[in-house]
Amino acid sequence: METMEKIQEQLRANGQEQLLQWYGDLTEEQKQHLMEDIAKIDYSVIREAMKPAGAPAGVISQAPVMTRPMILKNQEEYRTKGLAALKRGEVAAVLLAGGQGSRLGFDHPKGCLNVGLTRELYLFQILLANLQDTVNLTGTYMHMYIMTSELNYQETVDFFEEHAYFGYPQSYIHFFVQDMAPSLDHEGRILLERKDHISMTPNGNGGWFSSLRRQGLLEQIKQNGIQWLNVFSVDNVLQRIGDPVFLGAVLSEQALAGAKVIAKVNPEEKVGAICLRDGRPSVVEYSELTEEMRNERDASGAYKYYYGVTLNYLFNVEATEQRAMHRMPVHRANKKIACLNAQGETMLPAEPNGYKLETFIFDILEFFDKVTAFEVEREKEFAPIKNRTGADSLDTARELLRKNRPEWGEL
Ligand code: UTP
């Protein structure tokens, strides 16, 4: 452990002396806790995240998209190819469930949210039912790897236990834990959650592969002969898992990654759009697009940045491993973060008060030469629950669920 003088000097040099503000109030044990937290800080990540946001990095241009008519033409060929790989057990699912769902304001893992009105119908349960659909089609169980954070790991595991894994074989479900990052106030100062503890939040969904590997699961994946990982978010009730047509399309294009995309409702819809950045596959965030770019059309009259990513990707295992040594850019996300007030008491603010530091899954796309952007029908595959009410809420998701799952009856 470094000496106290050294630590103070380092904090001063990085503008983080506030971390010792309550030091005098702490017991010896608490001082030790705080010092352990401080020793783990990577200041370079904070500097990177606090760089002023500017124009989009690189030159943005239109990406090729495999649209619905193109898919329909080759659907049977894709389905056959995809099914064969699924039947051989070459595909596993990776469920990203480490987020905090702060927009929804639900104080449990998001997957424990009950979507039912007259009965229990949890997000995790729905995803397992969607996974089971594929198993019924192929006759082969798919492994599912569930990424949690340190904050929601135990509650997630207990939830699956309590619900007997929703009837799925337990030996095919594996949990892993993602890393945490310190959160900052709007000036870039690290927040304290308690007098002896830095406010740490899950470090975004971009770390899924490195966390999987660090916890020894990549070895297991390879030993099981799994070649493809279908990675997706926890909150889309229409999430299709192990879609054979999607996989077949990626295989036919000889791509090593694929992204499911939807046509935006209009150029103003706030979703990240698939694009090329300096000629490489990428996603341009809504906030990065200028008004002019949002309305830019190609020679055929179509909007250039019109296909939003749905957070459902396919990644070839070996190719991802080869690319995993690249450092992912760190983004800052303006959020409500629990921290100490002026009196030294923990509080949760009503408005965003700082930044969580996150890496994003889509930043890995540019390490691939080619990514199959595969268009899906919004009404059939995209019903995320992000907010309490309004767009992308429980209400909109239920409506789409009723349409797509009539066999489930009353929700
Ligand atoms: P979102 O971007 O919707 O973030 O995550 P969130 O934390 O769930 O919700 P908000 O923004 O605070 O309201 C998209 C997907 O990525 C996962 C989420 O669980 C969700 O499935 N995710 C996000 C992680 O697994 N880890 C993270 O650190 C962040």
Image: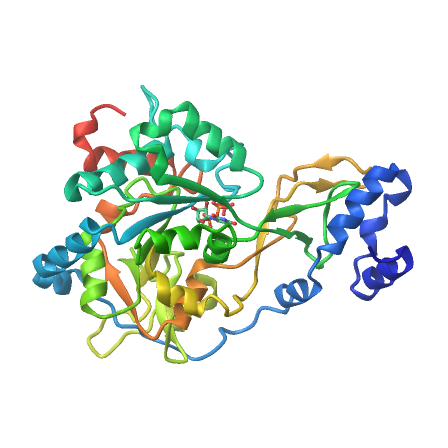
Residue at the (33%, 23%) spot, across then down: 117
Question: In the displayed structure, would residue 408 be above or below residue 90?
Answer: above
Question: In the displayed structure, would residue 152 be above or below residue 43?
Answer: above
Q: Is residue 85 left or right of residue 312?
A: left
**Residue 291: x, y in percent?**
42, 69
**Quarter of the figure that contains the C terminus:** top left
Q: How many marks?
A: 0
Residue at the (42%, 23%) spot, across then down: 162
**Residue 209: x, y in percent?**
45, 57
Question: In the displayed structure, would residue 37 be above or below residue 367?
Answer: above
Near-viewer residue (134 or 65)? 134
Near-viewer residue (19 or 290)? 19
Residue at far top of view: 118
Residue at the (33%, 32%) spot, across then down: 125
| Res. 411 visible in picture | yes
Near-viewer residue (370 or 272)? 370
**Residue 169: x, y in percent?**
31, 33
| Res. 284 visible in picture | no
Residue at the (71%, 63%) spot, across then down: 43
Model colouring: rainbow
**Residue 92: x, y in percent?**
31, 49
Q: Is residue 103 left or right of residue 239?
A: right
* Quadrant in the picture for residue 282: bottom left
Q: Is residue 162 left or right of residue 27?
A: left
* Quadrant in the picture for residue 32: top right
Q: Is residue 193 left or right of residue 218?
A: right
